[in-house]
Amino acid sequence: MKKTFLLSLFCIAFLGLNAQTLVISNGEDTGLNWWQAGSTAVEIVDWHPKEGNTSEKSMTIWISPISDQWSGGGLSGLDIDVNVYNTISVLVYKNVTGTVRLELQDGTANYFVTADYTTASVWQKLEFTIPSEMGNITTLLIAPFIDYDLSTITGEESRCFWDEVIAYNDTTTGLNEIQSDNSAIVRTDIYTLSGDLIHSVAGNQKIDSSILSKGLYLIRQITETGNVTCKKVCIK
């Protein structure tokens, strides 16, 4: 009863999620075995900026002017089916703008995809298209400062955080009658009316109603500015 009451206090702006989603790493309980790529170590911390990302933990690196350009973190032991997923999203926080690069490996070749981090000192969801010619992804590496002149980096410019690494299929549709400002949402949670969390996905993804049984649900969202909203939704 208490959980239901607390959830019902929120207002609404619901974002549909993708029917096909895979949490690769979230900092709390999935994909925690990040290893050092280049000349910097990866930490999982609970002191990341919370405005725009209220999750308990995130990954972070600190670099210096003598770090390798491709310094970042790697995650191996994956088996991401490229026939199911065509996009990977990552929440990123840096104090400088610039290109973020993912290196994707399928056991036979390496593929590089990039996205632009455009606004410094905010959490931004970056989307990377999985190359259509590659096989299933076994290893992922993130290089947050790939195009930055490290010789000029000072102070907090050297810190980067990332979180909510998600694979999904952006061609799937579902629950199209529920829409919101995609750019503003960083997390959406689906609860039963009794307040039990049953599904959680980051960013502007869609969810197929077929993954939910018929009934009423509470949909809770967190925006980039930290606002939390909620709506009751009926699945028929």
Image (cartoon, rainbow, N blue to C red):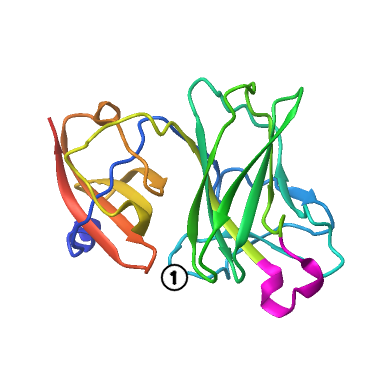
Q: Residue lying farthest bottom?
A: 155
Quarter of image, res 200: top left
Residue under the image location 78 percent in, 58 percent down: 41
Q: Position of residue 153 (x, y in %)?
A: 75, 73
- In the rendered image, residue 120 lying in the magenta stretch gets the answer no
Image height of 121 relative to 133, above or below: below
Q: Position of residue 1 (x, y in %)?
A: 19, 56
Q: At 38% from the left edge and 53% from the top edge, which residue is drawn? A: 187
136, 66: nearer the viewer: 66
Residue segment shown in magenta: 148-159
Residue 121 is left or right of residue 215, and the answer is: right
Residue 27 visible in the shown view = no
Q: Nearer the viewer, residue 39 or 234?
A: 39
Left or right of 29 on screen, residue 218: left
Above or below, 86 against 4 in this view is: above
Q: Nearer the viewer, residue 224 or 232?
A: 224
- Density class for disc 1 (Cα within 10 Å; few <14, some 14-19, many ≥20) is some
Question: Does residue 150 show up magenta in the picture?
Answer: yes
Residue 190 position (above or below residue 98): above
Q: Residue at x 64, y 23 (%)?
A: 134
Residue type beneath disc 1: Glu
* Residue 206 seen in render: yes
Which quadrant is home to the C terminus?
top left
Residue ID for mark 1: 51
Residue 235 rendering spot, x and y as whole percentages = 16, 34
- Give the structural element (helix, strand or loop) at label 1: loop
Residue at 18% from the left image edge and 65% from the top image edge: 9
Q: Quadrant of residue 169?
A: top left
